Image (cartoon, helix red, strand yellow):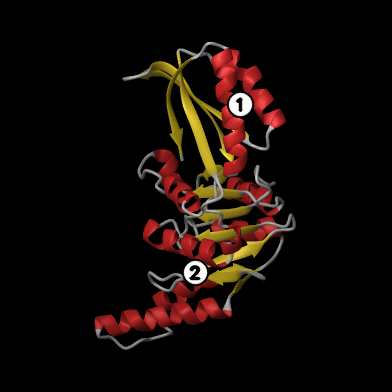
Amino acid sequence: MTNTAGRPAFGLIIIGDEILSGKRADKHLPKVIELLGARGLSLSWAHCVGDDRQRITSALREAFHGPDIVFSCGGIGATPDDHTRQCAAAALGVELALHPDARALIEERMQDLATERGERYDPERPDNVHRFNMGVFPAGARIITNPYNKIPGFSCDGPGGGTVHFVPGFPVMAWPMIESLLDSHYAHLHTKDAWQERSVVVKGAMEASLTPLMEAIERDHPVKVFSLPSVDHPEYGRHIELGVKGAPSDVSVAFDTLLEGLRQERAELGPVMVR
């Protein structure tokens, strides 16, 4: 899938019962939107899945068989409620194996912890042996470095041509890892100054009455039209924020056409916004 400008689409999978139960509020969705937006990119879709192996595997299988670039947050630890690594392998139909680079990083982290505590590092201690499970990834995976504590995430390519990047659920780890991926692997997609939104407040309008105009704009111009209705705004009351987004030159022409169409409809217009 590609967006209006022909660029690859980005998706987000958020994994964890704690999000669906309300024990923790999700922070990944707005942050990923922010990180993408700062680079002229946008999020095309997002899924939230609980700690259920069948559902996680299904969501990942769909992602692997699509062409999108997907970030998956959560569930890559080594506790009983962490299933993401196993589900990724199942979705790809491959075995799990301890990644040699992940093993080296995890061992380095354990040595650091032992030094901080003034202890001797014992690689045979049961809890240290267990920690290596955090580096057991689907065969063929590539590691994602973690600047916070060195415990890596991993990336896997799917048969549909896209890639899923797996990072921890902790924002302090996940966000720098995602940002690093965007600025390394996907720097060529950045279009910070080549993407724009223009919209206008249309007071007292109904979406149904504006749909023919919206369809005409999308038919005649290489932009995407959006409408955001509101029924109780403190200043504008019932209104619709109606706009277009795309390349600035295309947006400029399409938005002028949109405004002219609204004037012909004798719509009551409010302020214009540019993003």
The answer to whether 250 appears left or right of 15 in the picture is right
Mark identifier at residue 19: none
Give the image location of residue 27, x and y in percent: 39, 47
- Type of the residue with mark 1: Thr
The answer to which of 255 and 175 lies nearer the viewer is 255
Residue furthest to the left in view is 118
The answer to whether 23 appears left or right of 77 in the picture is left
Q: Which residue is mark 2?
A: 134
**Residue plotted at (36% across, 86% down):** 121
Q: Which one is closest to the eye, mark 2 or mark 1?
A: 1
How many other residues sit within 10 Å of disc 2, few (<14), some (14-19) or many (≥20)? Answer: many
Q: Could you tell me which secondary element the residue under label 1 belongs to? A: helix
Give the image location of residue 123, x and y in percent: 42, 85
| CA separation in Å, label 2 and label 1 | 55 Å
| Quarter of the image where one finds residue 17 | top left
**169 to 271, vertically: above or below:** below
The answer to whether 161 appears left or right of 243 in the picture is right
Give the image location of residue 9, x and y in percent: 63, 49
Mark identifier at residue 257: 1
Give the image location of residue 186, x and y in percent: 58, 62
The answer to which of 45 and 51 lies nearer the viewer is 45
